[in-house]
Each structure stands twice: as structure tokens, then as C-alpha cells.
Image (cartoon, grey):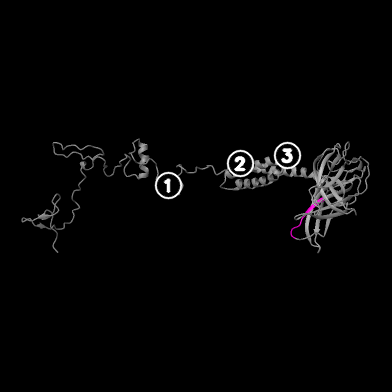
Amino acid sequence: MPDPLPPGDAHTATPGDPANASTADGAATPQRYRTPDLDAPQYAVPAYAAPEPGDAASPPTASGTPGRYAAPHGYALAGTDPRGADPLLPPYARDGAAQASGRPVGPGYPTTSAYPAAPGSPSAPGGAGYPLPGGSRPKALAIVALVLAGAGMLLLFVGAGLGSSSGLLAPLLLLAAFVLSLVALLGRHQGGKGFGVGALVTSVLGGLVSIVIAVAWLGPFGTSSGDDVVSNSGDGYYDDYAIPGVAAPGTDGQPDPGAQFPTPQQPTVTETAFGHDFGDIWWYVVVVDNPNADYVFDAFLDAQAYAEDGTVIGSSTAIATLLSGQTAVVGYFTIEGEELIDAIEVTVPEASEATLSPGEETGSFSVDGLTGAPDPGGTSTRTPPGSATGTVSGRFADDQRYVAVTVVARATDGRIVRAATAYVDAVPGDGRPVPFEAWFAEFPPDATLQASAHR
């Protein structure tokens, strides 16, 4: 293969020659490859090829030197930043560099010093929305606990002061406040530690106060009725006392020091009767005898109704304060269907449930002027309704409220054939009589009426 043309050959392209040479007849003659001359001089970029940014174009000088090139309006030369920041800096660093150097930032360019965070990711430290170290955590749980604790304490004192049932809700609120305060204090993502501590302390104090109030509240009820009579072996003084409200005028319902009393005896049921009233309603009456002169009973009389085959078909409870002697109490059964009552059974209180009330210091009721008559509108084919009227009075240290007057009608053979009850809202303790009226669904003819009162 022949050697390449030597330097200076007529067919060799030189700097400044066109890319393709042509022959005399105008035909293009391909250029031969020439080995680069490494010793050839290196050309530098002319000064006019890199004009300063913003320089205006100047006309050629007299010597023929071309003027500086000016970039067209709105364009920037390569290697420069249109905002005036240092070239070759990444976009996120140019604004900071431009601001630090005092050069203005171009219009329309963001002024933040960092790229915006990706959606859903936290902002960069110091940016908008980034939780700084030591920032607040949610306090709602601790605040709710404190509010519940305060409400529980308030209901506790209101219920205790007024004796209302609203105090029963206080322990539930205090318990909820205690649990929530623990969660707020122990939770790593919960704030409001001060509120949580306040709620915890308040709920604990409220629990202690509720226990004290419960003990103080139940104490009087435990000694007013249902407790055994306690005797002091030193002087024979009985620590228990009469049920409040049964003391006679001028007495305190308590025995004198040194007084001795016999052991209380259990009351007994002396008589029962029952009958159909109307619809599914059946009436019954029980006569209870309290044989104790110095003891009374705040009694719950539980009654059971039996069918002919001995199955229980109804139950009822009557409440009465049994003073010394006999007390008649009326109650009612609801018997559905075609069942008929064949017998009833009544449970009376035990002797251990007696409350000491010396006979000379215990008050009493009396019923006077008892009369009864059938309703004039009745017919001869059906026993007509009727009513019994009279007055009730009491001798007590205090006025008696919600007094029941029981009226029984006895046939000529002495059996109780009907019973009814009248209620009086208040009976003065000074003996003033109060009228009453007891209504009978069926007033038996030729019946003898008897009445007694109890609280």
C-alpha cells in the first residue's frame, strides 16, 4: 500500500480548505486520508467567540477585527446562568449562591434552597411542616382524661350533697379518667403530660373520696333497720334505736340507760285472704301480728300465689312498718290467662331484724269514724262497687308521710271477703285527723268494716 501523501501535497486538505476539492471540470474529487500531525500548532478560541454576557454587538474595527458578539435578547450563552448565579452549579445551589453574592434572582425562578419534598414524605429540616425537635405531640387524650376526672369529682360531691342518684355515675367517670390518663402518660406518641398527671391525681383522689362517701352513706342504713340488737354488757344500754319517725312526742325513741328488754320474737301471720278484683288483677290481704311491745320491724312481706296443683303463678311484695300489735297489709297479684289462685303464702321478717323501740316511746296511728256504703248506681244482679270513709290521725314526734289505711270487709261469719287501701300523703304527728276514702270494686252487702293504718 502506498504511503500517504507527504505534507504539502497539492491534493491534501489544509486548514481553511473546503471539505471537498474539485477538479477543473467541476467534478468532486474525494479527499485522501491524512495522518494528523501532532506537531501542528493548536488553535485557541478567538476572543470574539466567547463574548461577555450582556455585551452589545460592536461593529468591526478599522483593522478588520470583528466586534464582540452579543447574545440575542432573551437568550443566555452556554456556561452562564440566566439568574446571575455562578455557572456550572446545580439548580438547587444557584439561588443560594446568587442570594449570598447579592445578585438578583431572575423572575419566575423559585427562591427555595432545595428541591421540594416528594409527595407523602416529610419536609426537609427547617422547611414548612417539618416537626422540629421537641415539637408538640397530640394532647387530646390527656385533656379528655382531665375533663372526665373533673366531671367525676363534681358529680361525686353533688350526688353526696343532694342525696341524688347522679353520684352513681361518678365512679364510672373517674375510672375512665384513670385509664385514659395512664395511656396518655405511658404512650410514646401522646403529649400533654401535665394534663395527664392532673387527670391521674384527680381520678385517684376521687376514688378515695367515693369510698369514704360510700362508707358514710351506708353506715346509717346498716343500723336503722335489719341489724341485730346490740347490748352493752356494762350498763345494759341498747346501742340500736327505733326506726326514725316512730318515736312518740317528747321522746327520742331510745331506751333509758340501764333499761332491760326481753329478746325480740318473730312476727307471725294470723290471717290471709284473696280474691279477684278485675281483669288480671287479684287482691290479697295479710294480717301480721308483732308480739313485741318494745320492738318494731321495717318489713318486706313477700307473697306467693299458688294454683290448685301447687305451682307458683304469681308473686308480690308489700312494704310496711310493723308496730306492736296487728297490722293489715294489702297487696296485688297479676295473674294472666285462666289461672285461678288456690292459696297464698307470705314470708315475714326474722326476729333478728327487729329494731328496738321502747313501747312508752313509740307512737301509734288511730282510725275513727269508719263508715261504708255501696254505690247508689249499682244493680241488683251484680255486687255494686262502694267505698269506705273515715279519718286517720297519729301521735308521733314527726309528721308521718305516705300512710296507708287498710280497710277489710268481714262477712257475718268473720271471714275477710274484701279489702281495699287508701293512701294519705301526710298525717300530722300532733293528732290532727286527716280524712280518707277507700274504694271497693265490689262492696259486699251486710259486711262489717275494720281499718288499721301503717307506714
What is the distance, in whole Å, between disc 2 and disc 3 at their CAs? Answer: 30 Å
Tell me which amino acid carries mark 3: Leu
Magenta extent: 330-337
What is the distance, in whole Å, between disc 3 and disc 1 at their CAs? Answer: 62 Å
Q: Nearer the viewer, mark 3 or mark 1?
A: 3
Residue 332 part of the magenta segment: yes
Front-most of residues 169 and 448? 448
Q: Residue 161: percent from the left, percent from the top?
A: 73, 39
Give the number of the disc on residue 162: 3
Q: Secondary structure at mark 3?
A: helix
257 vs 53, left or right, is right
Residue 215: name its quadrant.
Answer: top right
Q: Residue 342: percent from the left, percent from the top?
A: 82, 60
335 vs 62, left or right, is right
Front-most of residues 33 and 192? 192
Do tag 3 and tag 1 residues touch (Cβ < 8 Å)?
Answer: no
Tell me which amino acid carries mark 1: Ala
Q: Residue 363: percent from the left, percent from the top?
A: 88, 41
What is the distance, in whole Å, between disc 1 and disc 2 at their CAs? Answer: 35 Å
Q: Which residue is at the far front?
A: 380
93 vs 57, left or right, is right
N-terminal of the two: label 2 or label 3? 3
Count residues near mark 3 (Cα–Cα under 10 Å), then give few for <14, some for 14-19, many for 20+: few
Q: Secondary structure at mark 2?
A: helix
Q: Secondary structure at mark 1?
A: loop
Q: Residue at label 2?
A: 195
Q: Residue at label 1?
A: 117
Count residues near mark 2 (Cα–Cα under 10 Å), then give few for <14, some for 14-19, many for 20+: many
